Amino acid sequence: MPHFRDSDIKELFKRYNAKTFLDFIQKYDEQMVPVMKARGYQCIHSMERTVAFTFGEFTFKRKRWKKGTAWIVPVDEKLGLQKNTRFSWELLYQIARLATIMPYDKVVQVIDLLYGISITKPTVVKAVKLGAQLLEEKADYHYYEEPKEHVKEAVDVIYVEGDGVMIKAKEHESPNHRFDLTHFVVHTGRRQIGKDRFELLNKKEFINLDHHLVREQVLDYLYNTYDITKDTLLITNSDGGHGYTPYVFKELAKALHIKKHEHFWDAYHLNQKVAAFFKPYPEELLTQAQEALFKHDKSAFRLVLDSTESLLSTEKDLENFQHFKRKLLNNFQYTKPAHLRGLSHAGIGIMESQHRKVTYRMKNRGMYWTLTGAQALSQMILLVDKNALEDLFFGDWQDAYQPIKELNNIPVSDWLKEDQSPSQLPQAKTRGLFTTLRN
């Protein structure tokens, strides 16, 4: 007995839906005839257009109307189709969404598997570029939009953490193929949402290749969002690396006129650094160092260092020891645990978990990025995390931005244009009434 396959029924539905869709286009085009004539437009001709939607690829005819120098294609407007593009906006959004969670070549396979539509890897690149363009436009829109009345939120504690994500990038103009994505996270605490699950309150993330820009964005956000008082406590945490030193966070507190500021040397990175240094030495030295840090006993830690120094045998060992000693003792005040400062450790040290969604997608596996791609994808990953990527593509802000765009004569990017329609690409084959593309 042959096995039943969902795909057989799905193919029947496709055929029915294809006919329904083409009938809809034809009827709508005819319905708009008296409307367009009443508006003073003249039908010039009907032209074919091939577009890939999430429900298949279609070639259809539609009327083009003109009044003076203005052209209108009612069917294209109804379907939300951009000029000179071969893909629907919804399909481009879904391609961009998939690109935030899997490699580009996997996106190609998933689109083919789920929709029966073959795209190419360059199409995925173009969808990400579309995201980059929309990110720029939305930032431009916020710059021009009229300021709204906003009541600043009164909070007792604000948490800020920062760290970098090192990525590999291919840029001909730069000999350095490693770039740092600056990542900052702001929140106001956490709450339990499951047996072992917690959620950060009022979480806001910032990521960009421009370290200075991100710091400015964090400062602007804190100033415009929270009511800073003499009792506001700022808790900051970092690994102390370049660009994330205590000085950076002290400057943030100073700019916001925050008097109560507690900075922590991230416990995960601190313990990792200490364990790595003491690995070649007797285990009891590591135990004593960890106990001194837990009790925040600087004298005890110095004794451990003195004992370690007596075991050094090479110039290289001495150099590593002096660097480690200087780093730890100069920043020992930031190793003081939260419980010894009268604070809870909850909400501190969240950076690594927040990094994960970016690092899982953008690091390792031999991945290289263009700077534009890295910038756009990292920001879209953050939007996906807070369910805001759909608003980037379909939000009302685009309608509000259009007059601004026209007023400032901002050109429309043409990188979405295709030299050929998908069905004209090599190795195309037909699946029912839908044309499927093969790479």
Image (spheres, rainbow, N blue to C red):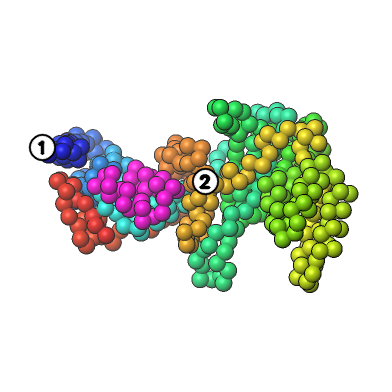
Q: Nearer the viewer, residue 393 or 260?
A: 260
State the mark number for residue 413. Answer: none
Q: Which residues are magenta?
A: 90-116
Q: Which residue is mark 1?
A: 1
Q: Determine whether the residue tagged by mark 1 lies in a helix, strand or loop.
A: loop
Give the mark, 2 or 1, whose residue is nearer the N terminus: 1
Q: Nearer the viewer, residue 49 or 256?
A: 256
Q: Is residue 29 magenta?
A: no
The three-letter amino acid code for the residue at tag 2 is: Lys
Query: Dividing the picture into quarters, in which one does residue 55 lie?
Result: top left
For the residues labelled 2 and 1, say whether their Cβ atoms are less than 8 Å apart.
no
Q: Residues within 10 Å of mark 2 (few under 14, many from 20)?
A: some
The three-letter amino acid code for the residue at tag 1 is: Met
Considering the whole magenta stretch, tell me its main secondary structure. helix
Residue 20: percent from left, percent from top = 17, 36
State the mark number for residue 357. Answer: 2
Query: Dividing the picture into quarters, in which one does residue 119 lie?
Result: bottom left
**Which residue is drawn at the image coordinates 79% and 69% (left, top)?**
313
Q: CA distance from mark 2 to mark 1?
A: 46 Å
Residue 337: percent from left, percent from top = 77, 40
Q: Determine whether the residue tagged by mark 2 lies in a helix, strand or loop.
A: helix
Relative horizontal placement of residue 114, taking residue 188 as reference (left or right): left
